[in-house]
Structure formats: C-alpha cells, structure tokens
Amino acid sequence: MIPELSNAIVALEDIPADWIGLRAVKETVGHRHVRDGNPQTNGKSLNRGIMVEVLAQGQIGYGATNILTLDSIRSAAQTAYRQALAASEWSLHPLTTAVRPKVVGQYLSPFVKPLDAMTPGEINDLLVRLCQTLKVSDQIVQTNATAIANETESWFVSSNGSEVYQKFLMLETHYGATAQDGAIVQQRSNNGYLAHCYQGGWELFPKADLWQRAQQVGEQAVELLTAEECPATTTTLVLAPDQMMLQIHESIGHPLELDRILGDERNYAGGSFVKASDFGELVYGSKLMNVTFNPTIAGEFASYSFDDTGAPATREHVIQDGVLLRGLGSLESQTRTGIPGVSCARASSWNRPPIDRMANLNLEPGTDSFEDLIGDIESGVYMESNCSWSIDDQRHKFQFGCEYAKLIEKGKLTKTLRNPNYRATTPQFWHSLTRVGDESTWQMYGTPYCGKGEPNQAIRVGHGSPACVFSDVEVFGGGA
Amino acid sequence: MKLVEQANLSADIAHREAIFDRLVEALLSDLQSGEQAKLELTGEQSQFVRFNNARVRQTGCVTDGEISLTLMDDRRNAYRSFPFTGDWEVDWRQASMALAELRQEVPQLPEDPYLVLPAGNATSNDIHTGKLLAPEQVTSAILPDVVGLDFTGIYAAGLQVRAFADSAGQKHWFATESFALDYSLFTADGQAVKGTFAGNEWNAEAYTAKLADSKQQLERLGRSPKAVPRGQYRTYLAPSAVADLLGMFSWGGVSESALQRGDSALTMLQRGEKKLSPHFTLTENFRHGLVPRFNDWGEIAPMELPLIEQGELVNTLINSRTAKEYGKTANGANGIESLRSPDLSPGNLPAAEILQALGTGLYLSNLHYLNWSDRPTGRVTGMTRYACFWVENGEIIAPIENLRFDESLYRCFGDNLVALTTFQEFIPEVGTYDQRSLGGVWAPGILADGFTYTL
C-alpha cells in the first residue's frame, strides 16, 4: 500500500497545496456474542478507506472516501483543498507543515496466536460454555459472553516524505451474569463491561483461570441479591484497578486534553477545569500521584509508535509527584498553546480527522501490597468494576458506580455490599489519595468506547493502575 | 447564496439505488436451495465544519457506505459487512467474496433458535431531497452572523441513505438530504446558550432569526452564576432536557427484551408496582416522517404506537426476535428495541406561565452525561448544562453553577410531575458516531416538584 499511496502523492502534485497527507485504514473485525447459550451475533466487518488532508493557506481541509481509486483520491484531495481555501479566511489558528513532520517507521502489535487461530465454531463453543458456567443458579436470569477480534492496518504517506505502516491486532472479551430475585436485580461481570481489551492474539483468551473466574462472577451476581446496600457515609474508599481505569480516564485523561482546554470540545464533550496556565504549576493531587502517557507498553490496548499525524510516540510523565507537567495535546494543540504535549493526534478511522485523545494513560505503582492497603483501614469500603459513570462538562463533579463492594472493618474485607456508588470533585478526590498499591496490585484494562469530537469519534484507550486508597469520600447505595 | 442543485443530488441517489438493486438481484439469484439472505445498507456524503470561537477548527467531507449481508441456512446465520462504493465492479467483487465466506462459516455455528427468517412483502421508497449550502459557502453563510461572539459547534450536512432487501422480496430505500448546525454561544465566564438549527433546506433568514434568539438568551447569562446548595428543588426542565431523560427509555427502558432479562428500569411499571403521572403519555410516532419506518428485518412499524398512556405502560417495543424468544407479538421495533421517533404528549402549561408556575426553583435548559445510578429503581444521575437559572417568585435571578442531579424517573415523571407545557419542540438527533444520525425527539417542557440535586 505504501508504494500506491506514494504514487498517489506524486499524482497530486498539481494541487497547489503546502502539504498533502494520505492516511489509509483497513479494519477487519470479527464479532461473536452469545446470550444465555444462544448465538446473538456472528460475523465479520471490513471497513476501509482513505483520508486526504491538504494544508493550504494555513488551514487543513480533509476529504475522505471509501473508493480507493486514484480518481477518487484525487477528487477527495480537490475537495479537501477547496475546503481548506474556503475556510482559510476564518481559520482558528494558522498551521504550518511543522504539525505534520516527516516520519518513517512501522509498528506491529505483539502476538503469539494470530487472530485466525480460532475458528468461528470454536469461539462459539467457548462462549456457549462460558454462559453455562456463569449460570450457577436459577436466579441467574441472563448470561452473556463476547469476543471481538480486530485487525487494523494503517498507512500514512505525505508530500514531505512520511511513510508509516502500523498493524494492530486486538482482542476484546467480556462475560457477565444478571441475577434477579423479584424487584432486586444485580449484575456482575469480568471487571466491567468489555474491560478486557488488549493488543495481541488468541493467547489472551481463554486464560488458565477462565472457568474458575466465570463461576465466581456468576456466584457473586447471586451473592449481591442478598447483600446489604452500600451505606451512605463519608469514609475511606479503596478502588480496585478495574474501577481506577474509569477514574483515571474521566478525571485525569479528559481534563488534561489540550483541545478541551482550548475550547474545541465545548459544544459536545465539554471543556476542562484545568487552565492553560496550570501546566507546571498546579498540584493536581497527592504526592503519590504519578501518571504517565505511555503508548510503549506491550499489549496495552492503545499502544502505537506514531499517532495519526505521524508524531513519534514516547512515554511521558503527565503528572509527577502530584504536579501537573504536561497536557494530552497533539502537535497542533501544542502549537496553539505553547504547552508541552504528547503524540496523541488520533482518529477513530479513515473517515474522521485526528484530534487530541488520551491513548494509554496509566497510574504508576507505589509501594504497598494489597494487604498493606487494607490492613490499616479501621472502616471503609472497597469497590470493584465500573457499572455507572457520569461527570460534568468541566470534568469536576463526578459520580461513579461499581458492581461489587466489600465493607472494610478493622483492616479486613468483611460483608459484601451492593449498589456501591461514590461522588466527589476531581481536585478534592485526587488530593485525598493516601496510598498507592505496588506492582503486585497493578492491572491494565481498556475500552473501545471513548467518545469525543465533532464529528463524533469512539476510540480505543488503555489504562493501567494499582489499587488505591482515598480518604473521606462520600459513598452511598441504591434505592429510589 | 448558492444552494446545491437538486438535480445533481437526485441523480446521485438514483445511481446508488440502481447499484444496490443490482447487487441485491445478483446476490439473491446466487442463493442455493435452503439459503436465505438479507442486505442492509447505510451510506452518506457528508460535510463537517467544526467551529471554535467563531472560527473554523476543522473542515472536510466524507463519502462512506457499508453493506451488511446476512446469510441464513439450516437455522444458523452470520453476516459480513463490507464497503459500498457505488462502483459495480468493486462492490460485486466484495459481495460475492462475502457470500463465499459466509457459506464456509455458517455451518460451523450453533443453531440460533430465535432466528428470524425473511418474510412478508413490505416495500417502500422514501426520498427527501433538500436544498443545502454549497460546501465552499458554508463558512461565509454561517460565520459573519457570529463575529464577535464565542461561537462553537459543528455544521453537518449532506445525503444519507438507509436501505434493506431480503430473499423474501422485501425492499426499502430511504434517502434524505439534510443539515444540522449544532452550536453553543459562550460568555466570558463560561456560561453558554445551546442552539440547534436543522432541516432539509437552508434558510438564511431563519438562521439569522435563530441566532438572534440565542443572542437574546445569552444576555440573560450576564449575571454572575449562583452556587446552589444540594437539596430538592421545584424544577422546570425545558424540552431539550426532557429529551435527554427520554433517551434513557432507549437504554434499558421500553425494550421488551430488556424487561424480560432484568435489564430495564421499567420493570416496576410493567408489574404495576409503580405508575407514572397520568399526564405522561409517550408514543413512538412516525408521522413526523424523519426516519425510516422499516427495521432490521424489513418490517414496517405502525405509524403510531402508544407506549405509556396516562402513566401506564400499554406497549413495549418488541422486535421479531424478541417475539419469538418470549412468545410475544412483534410490533416493528428495531434490533435493539430503541425509540426511533419518540413523542411525549404536551400538557396544559402555557409558555408564558412557566416561570410563574415554577415560582422558586431551578430552570434547566439542558442536561449532560446521563447514566443510570440504580437502574431497577429508575434512578438517573447527570449534570445541568448550559443556560440553567435560579428562579425566585417567578423571576429569573441568576444563572447557576452546574449541579449534579440523582433522581428517579418514577418521581420526576410520576408523583412529582406537576405539568407539561402546551408546546412541544423538536430536538434533532445530531450524533455522528460512525455516521450522521437521523430523526430526533418531540418533547414538551415539564415542571416537577422536589427534583434531587446531590453535588
């Protein structure tokens, strides 16, 4: 594909643009979903197309098409050029080729077993058996099991010599159960909906502990039916890594996106309580807080070597010892703000333009084992697995809910609690971080559903975190 | 101002339909004994212009299309989705490859006891041509009116296509040309007014009038925002805010499948353990004609389907698969049994009397980021957003700092519902995930007592 795109770039030389880039994407997704032991979804989708970006008079215009002929690419380029010219009089910030530097390289997801190593029949057999294992009693009224295998290739070629090829192999899996007793309904899943999203092949699924874990998920769904409601109180809160994923995503990732701070997102996803002047100054949270943008971790869901404008990807501290250092902003946003950023200009596919996204954003481990974290807590609540999320448009006031919780009494996990929720404001919450788990507690998860942008884009992100302890957090349960 | 010629776009629509028809004919004539199939098409030619601070942030055009082919044989089924380009050679090659792959895959799969086979003889052809701005004229048509304002948002416009065909001979074609300008005007301290200007024909005078209205609203935001302590307040929810709450009915709400599987917030309503207000009547109403009536199986939904009448659940959305699984009668619902054209009936509160009827409390124009906080009890949490005000004795006192609410639908649409407005507004669906959305919500405003704010 690189030679074809290079030839296309040559063929577009008559367009009097300052820069032209071609980004082709081919995405093949196999989707298998079984509910209550019966197949619901079986199939494969192929999505491919090309985006032409044209820089003219300081404005980038784009044209995207799923017709991969030279004529169609030319037509898309001309459309993009006309769009750029028409908008240049109204350009928000004049751009130069500095935001699309020359880069050459490639990236391949690590994997052991390729995505065709399991047949559709074998995958269905596995998912059916998972449903059967999850149904531990007649009180289980629904079981679900899903596997999504995604192979995405992208090619980026530009008039200033960029040539990038990246190939991603990804596996997304999920299973869960719903238990019901009259009006009481409880759900339990494997770390939250579709949280097991990784780069790699079928070596990721099934793991050795799959059946034991599925049995546990089913049993915990039933256990929740008779559990006490989470108490309404202000207490010490311990979050498992599968909830920390959401906490990091919503209250660190999004508020630090430079395009939100610049106002691009105000009509849709929102702005940020963080100001441009806060970088290098703001104490975002406790000194235990070390957050990295890290697209270099093997197997994490949003790893890559280059973003969708070709910027090389590197690990960077976003927050160090609690102090805000760097924004999640692309070269375009860095140019507009003068704030240091990261390589995060990403597009959901060929038909959307790149914008600031968080990719992998991780909380670095601390020094305490899980037993140490819990052992010193006189009274508190431990929560696992996200099931509800809501935060304001400045990423300030949030309320999150989890599937499963345990009461902490005198340093021990005791009673199971249902409908656990908590709410706080972002700065207050991160300043209340009192302990951070060590590497033995660190786990990584991901999601393909981070939504943002106009036009809207859902994109993959990965988050790794240890278990963490927060003091004086308002927790509460369910009920009308 | 140059508007795009209808003739060109009509020819483009006709070309796409002809290619789709040819693919359908070729694929279906290729089916072997026992095989059945359906094809679903989505496509668009869209322009997107994104604004920030009354300037252009990003601008471009997208030509996209996708066909999903489902093969059914021996109680098993699978699909292949592939690009629809409108080029016969390319599309046929892809389609025939998909059919060959499906023939390999389907026999490997478990039987699907609730498989819905093609049936019926429904056909439809629904084309709405429009008059849209020429792509190069969008910025000069929109931005001069907002110079000096902090205007942000997106203009999305163009052709959208949805189509369906199956081996029973059903065939549907829906094409519409439309635009939507979804925008916000901000004050210097971050308060904002939200506006949407949408339709099939761009009208410069109507646009100017819409903006004038938004500017007038913006002036009301000039006062410093008031911090309102958490608690319960009498609250007016404007139609846009009501539309957000109605959206929850599509996510574990009126779906029969969700009710059967413990996934619905309306279980207590169905069981008769709870009622909504006798003033609350929700209908799936296709008379507005903005979305296709055919569903994932080519079935035509009834023109009107009452769901909640005077507070009681009288119908749920039941698709043919759910009907088969739970022994129900299907009513044309789509694959996920979501609302496609919801219409909440108006009430008796005139617009001029809203503030007086509210008395002292909160006036909410918009909500943001809703999620279930306890689905079985119908509890929803979310945020206030944009032009929201503190009102005392029927007078707007000040905009508010954003508040988090956590409230049960059984309360705010039930015992605590005081009144609905005499007017409805159409709130267009402006979402653009994967493709531009169609349709929207018809909703009045509502007045509710004791709405709960928690942060």
Image (cartoon, coloured by chain):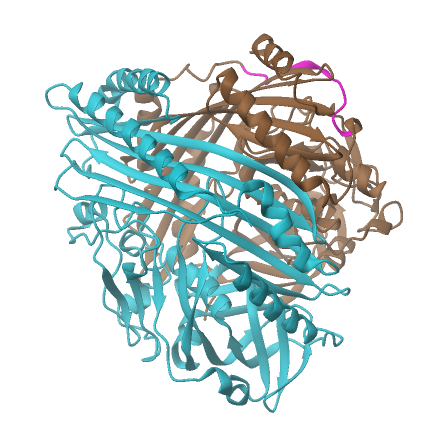
At x 55%, y 41%, the residue is B135
For the residue pair B287 and A390, the one nearer the viewer reads as B287
At x 67%, y 41%, the residue is A87
Q: Residue furthest bottom?
A: B393
**Figure chain in brown:** A
Quadrant of the frame with the N terminus of chain A = top right
Q: Residue furthest top?
A: A3
Q: Is residue A136 positioned above or below A274 on the image?
A: above
- Where is residue A302? Give x, y as percent: 62, 30
Magenta stretch: residue A108 in it? yes
Q: Is residue B432 positioned above or below B410 on the image?
A: above
- Where is residue A275? Give x, y as percent: 81, 53
Magenta stretch: residue A334 in it? no
Residue A419 in view, yes or no = no
Quarter holding residue B219: bottom right
At x 19%, y 39%, the residue is B114
Q: Is residue A417 left or right of residue A175?
A: right
- Where is residue A452? Give x, y as percent: 59, 45
Quadrant of the frame with the C terminus of chain A = bottom left
Chain B display color: cyan
Q: How many marks?
A: 0
- Start-end of magenta stretch: A99-111
Residue B373 in view, yes or no = yes
Q: Is residue A96 left or right of residue B430?
A: right
Quarter holding residue B70: top left
Q: Is residue A363 left or right of residue B441?
A: right
For the residue pair A444 and A426, the one nearer the viewer reads as A426
Q: Residue furthest front?
A: B1
For the residue pair B224 and A62, the one nearer the viewer reads as A62
Q: Is residue B260 positioned above or below B68 on the image?
A: below
Q: Residue furthest left?
A: B33
For the residue pair A378 and B44, the one nearer the viewer reads as B44
